[in-house]
């Protein structure tokens, strides 16, 4: 399936990328994270187990076991610090 | 209900005035303004830049307001959050809640701010003498938001 | 600190703006505006007149603010209360509290309002279709004020 | 001793008086209230035991056993209803 993946704040800067379109063969957010980690470098570091990041699917924050629908807009970002 | 994300400054008096204009049923309006400080975690802050997630931000703020409306009887709510570069002393966020009685207005305004801090996709980057740094989420904000869960109407015998 | 009793309207935006003007250490300003409603205890209210005890009023308001300052670390407080004849929709009272963090600003603002309701010598007389009536003190206001006692720093093992 | 006694709100209207200067031979606020009650009529009614009113001495609310200093400004008024 195709996913649109967005990165924000520190992750956007570290990955050098605000947005990409990905082919994804898995089913869950955890599997997408594993696919990105496999790129190594900053990706492996920032998305390692124990690092604090959030995943939103179609603009709702989800747990890592959430299923990703085809054409989903997936966003990965640090814990929020607004206000 | 008014929800806005904008770069420009907001006018507290005008926003609160617009909520009560022409109405005679509002007894209480509690409002909160968050401002950029020149000091955070021991370092001088020269400026900050607020980034957000367009689309999700508005959706998340609307969900917070909806949850506040489910918990309390509110007559109007305004939430305005600025993004972009801000200087110390600049206002960042406005939350204003109108209700018949003050208890609801105070509770709902603080609830919206606490949830906004942990659920709305905004991120702050500070410029300090040592360079730029992304602000880390604070445990105290998680604790403040956790005070409100579970919703009152679902509270069990515990 | 600013405490005022006046007949004329106040300007929320100007008052809160004056608190933060030229300062970069304030992170939070919580403000409360109480307004005259057209309905109270089931009767339509056409107007109300607020009477006070000149001299004692200012002293009582200053004492409330002093007590709030003793309980929380506050950067500035403004209290303005109107007297005289007011119409439904008119603002009656403004309390604004500035602090570094929002928790203190919310708590102190609500505390000052709760204590003002039970300790500051103001009395409301309403004009209704049935004639004039003095508003009775409400048990809910006593209960709201009682939540804050005793001061936190004196709270015992109970 | 001499006292300046002030009445507010409903009590001011019922007593038909905002202020008076009194000779007082007692010691406490309770004794002043008793002296005023003895006037009968509205005074007896509004200041009866069980009626809700407050007494301030020199602009501080006091309990009924409070001593009244000479030249005190004593105010008697209903429970407050501001804000």
Image: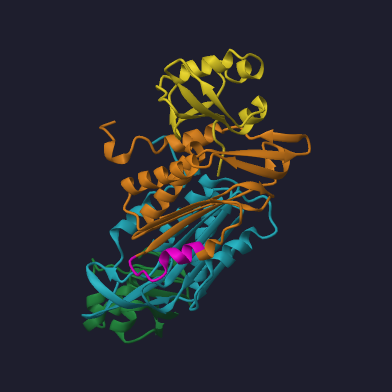
Chain colours: A green, B cyan, C orange, D yellow
Query: Residue D56: where, in percent of width, then height?
Result: 47, 30
The magenta stretch is C15-25
B66 vs A28, nearest the viewer? B66
In this rendered view, identify the residue nearer to me: C18 or B149.
C18
Q: Is residue C96 above or below residue C125?
A: below
* Residue sitting at the far right: C129
Please state if B13 lies on the left or on the right of C25 as rendered: right
Q: Which of C45 and B114 is in front in this view?
A: C45
In the displayed structure image, the side of residue B43 where residue B123 appears, left or right: right
The x and y percentages for residue A25 are: 38, 78
Residue at 41% x, 71% y: name it.
Answer: B122
Residue at x 23%, y 72% (from the top left corner): B43
Q: Is residue C74 depicted above or below B134 in this figure? A: above
Q: Can residue A83 be seen in this view?
A: no
Q: Magenta segment: does it hold B109?
A: no
> Which quadrant is home to the N terminus of chain D?
top left
In percent of width and height, residue B123 lies at 37, 73
Quarter-of-image position of residue C146:
top left
Residue projecting furthest to the bottom: A16
Would you say A73 lies left or right of C10 here? left
Image quadrant in which you'd find residue B35: bottom left
């Amino acid at each position: 399936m195709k996913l649109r993946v967005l990165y924000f704040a520190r992750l956007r800067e570290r990955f050098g990328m605000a947005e990409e379109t990905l082919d994804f063969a898995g089913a869950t957010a955890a599997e997408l994270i594993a696919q990105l980690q496999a790129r190594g470098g900053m990706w492996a570091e920032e998305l390692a187990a124990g690092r604090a990041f959030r995943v939103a699917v179609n603009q709702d924050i989800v747990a890592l076991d959430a299923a990703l629908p085809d054409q989903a807009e997936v966003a990965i970002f640090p814990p929020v610090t607004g206000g | 209900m008014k929800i806005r994300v904008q770069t420009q400054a907001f006018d507290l008096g005008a926003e609160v005035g617009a909520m009560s204009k022409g109405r005679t049923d509002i007894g209480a309006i509690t409002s909160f303004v968050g401002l950029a400080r020149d000091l955070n975690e021991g370092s001088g802050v020269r400026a900050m830049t607020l980034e957000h997630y367009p689309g999700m931000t508005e959706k998340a703020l609307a969900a917070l307001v909806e949850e506040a409306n489910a918990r309390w009887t509110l007559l109007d709510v305004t939430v305005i959050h600025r993004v972009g570069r801000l200087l110390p002393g600049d206002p960042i966020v406005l939350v204003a809640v109108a209700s018949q009685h003050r208890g609801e207005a105070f509770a709902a305004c603080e609830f919206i701010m606490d949830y906004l801090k942990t659920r709305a996709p905004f991120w702050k980057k500070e410029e300090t003498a040592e360079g730029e740094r992304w602000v880390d989420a604070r445990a105290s904000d998680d604790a403040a938001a956790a005070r409100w869960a579970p919703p009152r109407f679902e509270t069990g015998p515990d």
